[in-house]
Amino acid sequence: MRAGTAQICLVVAASLAAAVSGASFSLSDAKQFVYLAGAAYCDASSLKSWTCGRACSGPLPAVPGSITVVQNRTMDLQAFVGKLEDGRAIVSFRGTRPTKIQDWVTDLKSAFKTDWTGPGCPSCRVAKGFYEAYLALAPDIKVALHGLNAGTVVVTGHSLGASMAGIAMMDLYASGFNLAPAHYTFGQPRDGDEVYASTFNS
């Protein structure tokens, strides 16, 4: 995909997300989140020092030394938690890597629905693979967020990471974290059923 096409897709996808959530769309915010979503694909050492090349060169960088990389090697999952220069906390989930079989297994399992077991959405059914992937990282993500003492949390991700981000927004909000009013995800598959969507949008 060419860069220009990717930017158009970004704007359309992010505009739709903002419209559904009731938040106003900001192109500058969307561009910031593109970099932050891309950074989740970097290796752990370059993430921690925020030296991961182009993905770490966005207009709103994370603060080096604030970053915790959360992984589940069995399921080939990665996210990072850190503090942005504007004081907000960021959670960014890595998406599907085409050469990693376990990522495809997670994606395929998401064709099936399972019950939401956390707070905030007792009658919801969500994509099994995406939900299990998020739950595998959630405890360490929450510990890292508590350690940052940041007032507001923003969440992003691409592809598989975007669906995990959507689930994270619901869970973190229900768990008492102060989420920002607008978040941007990219290439996000559907996370759950109509009850989940209605609860999410409320």
Image (tube, rainbow, N blue to C red):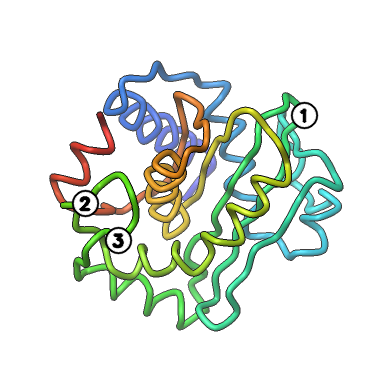
Label 3: which residue?
Answer: 117
Label 1: which residue?
Answer: 85
Q: How would you rate the neighbour count of disc 3 (Cα within 10 Å): few for under 14, some for 14-19, many for 20 or more?
A: some
Sequence order check, earlier mark of 2 and 1: 1
Question: What is the count of numbered marks?
Answer: 3
Label 2: which residue?
Answer: 122
Left or right: 157 with respect to 17? right
Q: Amino acid at mark 1?
A: Glu
Alpha carbon separation for disc pair 2 and 1 = 36 Å
Image position, residue 140 (x, y; %): 61, 61
In the image, 2 versus 45, the foreground residue is: 45
Tag nearer the camera, 3 or 1: 3
Question: Element type at marker 1?
Answer: loop
Q: Amino acid at mark 2?
A: Pro
**Looking at the image, do the residues carrying marks 3 and 2 touch, with CB atoms under 8 Å apart?**
no
Q: How would you rate the neighbour count of disc 1 (Cα within 10 Å): few for under 14, some for 14-19, many for 20 or more?
A: few
Residue ID at (40%, 32%): 14
